Amino acid sequence: MEDRLQKLISAAGLMSRRAAEKAIEDGQVTVNGAVASLGDKADPVRDDIRVNGRRLPNDKEKVYLMLNKPRGYVCTLSDEKGRKTVTELVRDVGTRLYPVGRLDMDSEGLLVMTNDGDFANHLMHPSHQVEKCYRVTVSGDNLESVPERLSVPMVMDDRKLSAAGVRLLKCEEGRAVLDVTIHEGRNRQVRRMCESVGLQVHRLCRISEGPLTLGKLPSGQWRYLNRDELAAFERAMKA
């Protein structure tokens, strides 16, 4: 269905409608290879719409990516308190994306984002118990015993959790670095687990989710998931 270009560009999340109008006036927008004019209409499904050479995705085109979420961002599309949102970090993708699951504002690391609602719901469904691993820096007493204390099955929100996998990576000067692997996704689960055994969390970073690993993706940056990663997700959710 055709609509005015500035409306399509704004709806895709690239920029405001006023900024889109200016981009059109400045000759930065093309439709099927021809420079567009203000007032032109196009069909985002049928036409090749580009802003500064970057193609505007249509609503039927599925996008899957991973973001290395920094601290200080919330996992919502908009925030009533005016806090920074993860959608700001993926604005240049050119379509509205939704975070799959959440990382709280003070946490960082791997966050899957997509416009495929079926994929997101399937991935988050508790029955699939997709493994998520977090690298956590904590302080407290008896740090050498932390793996045993954290790996005991706990009750949270009136539900018994699966036992976590806990590996002690480093312990020195009153601090420890752990890898904590969980299967559920209760609200602030890893932080609450640590607090329940008297640990203070100083840093929490998700380093893997299912078959995905964060690797060396810089903080605040994103990349598309490749076909092998998507196929591995499908296999994991069918297992």
Image (cartoon, rainbow, N blue to C red):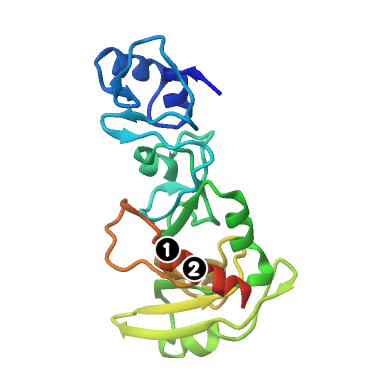
Q: Residue at x 27, y 58 (%)?
A: 218
Q: Quadrant of residue 216?
A: bottom left
Residue labelled with disc 1:
227
Q: Position of residue 27 (x, y in %)?
A: 25, 17
Q: Residue at x 31, y 28 (%)?
A: 51
Q: Position of residue 55 (x, y in %)?
A: 35, 35
Q: Position of residue 157 (x, y in %)?
A: 71, 66
The answer to whether residue 130 is visible is: no
Q: Position of residue 42 (x, y in %)?
A: 45, 21
The quadrant of the rendering that contains the C terminus is bottom right
The quadrant of the rendering that contains the N terminus is top right
Residue type at mark 2 is: Ala
Would you call the spot at circle 2 few (<14 residues within 10 Å), some (14-19), or many (20 or more)?
few
Which mark is drawn over residue 231? 2
Q: Are marks 1 and 2 in contact (CB under 8 Å)?
A: yes
Q: Is residue 156 left or right of residue 63?
A: right
Q: Nearer the viewer, residue 86 or 2?
A: 2
* Rendered position, 63 above or below 59: below
* Rendered position, 52 above or below 135: above
* Rendered position, 111 above or below 136: above
Q: Nearer the viewer, residue 111 or 155?
A: 111
